[in-house]
Amino acid sequence: MNSLLSPELNLSRNKRIATVLLVTMVVIWLVLLFSSRFFPQYNGVIHILTLGAEAGVVGGLADWYAITVLFRDPFKHIWVPKFIREHTEIIPRNKARIAESMGRFVQENFLAPQIVRNKLEAIDMSLYVANWLAEPANAKMLSEELKRLVPRFLKIAQNETINQFIKQSSVQWLSETPINQAVARTMKAVFDNKIHQDVISLILNSVDNWIHNNPEYAEEIIQKILDETGVFGHLSRGATILGFDVKRNVVWGVLRTVRDLNTQPDHHIHLMLNHSIAQWMTALEDDNSEESQKLEAFKQSLVQSPTVVAFGFHIYESIMQGIIEDLQSEQSAISRSLQGLMMRIGNQLASDIAVRQALNHEIAQFAEYAANRYADTVIQYISEQIHNWDTRDMIGKIESEVGGDLHMIRVNGVVVGFMIGIILGLVRFAIEGIG
C-alpha cells in the first residue's frame, strides 16, 4: 500500500498516524488516572493499564524526539544545556561529513576497481548484449531511438553561428597542424600491414580483367594516349623500323606489363614502388625534410583556397543533410540497415564464444581502468553536490524519502512501550501478590 503513495504523501500520512496514536495514548493515560478514583475496586487492573499507557506515552515521545533531532532542533526557543543542543539537527550539522562519507561509501562499495572487475567477470556481459540485440523488437527500438537522436545532434551543426564556428576552427586547425607525421604514421600502418599491396592488386586485377575482356578497346585507348602525348613522335603515327610496327609492340608491351604486375608480386616495378614509398615515408618523419616542406606547402595551398574550402564544406553539408533527410523519412534506409546490422551482430556474437570471451576480457579491463582513473572524480562530484545542497532542500529530500518509515518508528514506540508497560505491571502485580 505504501508503495502506491508518493514519498511526500507517505510521510504526511505516517506522521499523522503517529501523532494521532500518541495523542490517543495520552488521553487514555489521563482517563485511567481519573478512573482509579471512581472505580477503586478495579485499582489493580487500572494500575496495570496505566503503567502501559505511561510507557506508551514515554516510548512515543522518546521516538518523536530521536527522529526530530535528526533534522531539527526541537528546543529552538527553549533553553537547554549545551551538551543537549549540540546533539540536535544532526544531519544539517554534519552535512560535510555526510557528503564525505557518502562519497567514500560509493567508492569503496561500487567503484573500487577490483569490485568492478569481479562483478563484470561474474557475468557474461557480451552474451547479454548479444541476446538483447538479436531480439527484433530491441533492435528496432534502438534504431528508432538513433533515428530520433542523430538528426537532432546533426542539426546542432547546422545552426548558422555554430556552423561558422566549426568552419573557422577547422580551417585554423588544419592550417596550424603539421600533417607530415600523421601521414607518415598512416603510411607506416598501411605499409606494415601490406594494405597498399591489396589495393594495388585489386586495381591491377580489375584492369587486367577489363583488358582481357576488351583487348581491342584497351589497345585503342593506349594508342590514343600515345598519339595525344606524342611520346614516339613519328613512330607513334605508325612508322615501322626493320619490318615491325613499333607503336603496336609498345601497346602490347604495356598490356603485358600490366598482366605481369598482377601475377608477379615480386616484379621489379612492385619492388621499386615499395622502395619509393619507404623512402618517402622516412623523409616525412623529418619535419625539416624537403618532402615534408612540399607536403606542408601543398596542404596550405588547399586550406588557403576559398574554392577548395567551400567545396569541402559543401560536400560535408550535403552528406549531413542527406543523412538527416533519410533518418527523418518514414522509410529510412539507414534505420532499416542499422536494425538489420544490430540483429546480425547480436546473432553472430551470441554464437561465437571466442569473440565473447575476448570482449568480456576487454570490457572488464576497460571498466577497471575507468574505475581506477575516474572514481576519485565521481566521488568528488558526489561529495561536492551534497555539500552544496541547500540545508533545507537536503532535509526535505532525505525526510521525504525515509521520513515515512521513521515516523512509523514512532507508532512502534507507542505500541511497544504500551506492551512493555503492561508486562512490567503484570510482573509487579505478581511479585506484590506473592509478598
Image: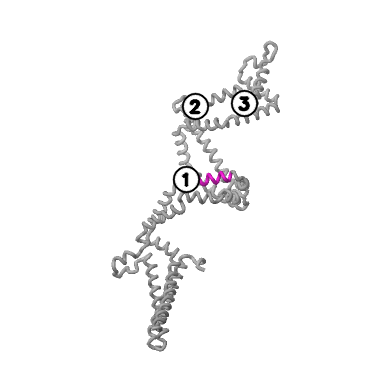
Residue 104 versus residue 323 in the image, above or below:
below
- For residue 338, the mark is none
Q: Which residue is mark 1?
A: 369
> Alpha carbon of mark 1 to alpha carbon of mark 2: how far?
35 Å
Query: How does the figure colour the protein chain or chains?
Result: one colour
Task: Name the residue nearer the viewer: 335 or 201.
Answer: 201
Q: Which residue is mark 2?
A: 282
Q: Which residues are magenta?
A: 355-366
- For residue 265, the mark is 3
Secondary structure under tag 2 reads: helix
Task: Name the residue nearer the viewer: 297 or 398.
Answer: 398
Task: Name the residue nearer the viewer: 136 or 118.
Answer: 118
> In terms of image quadrants, where is residue 408?
bottom left
Residue 333 versus residue 298 in the image, above or below:
below
Q: Is residue 247 left or right of residue 357?
A: right
Q: Earlier in the sequence, mark 3 or mark 2?
A: 3
Secondary structure under tag 1 reads: helix
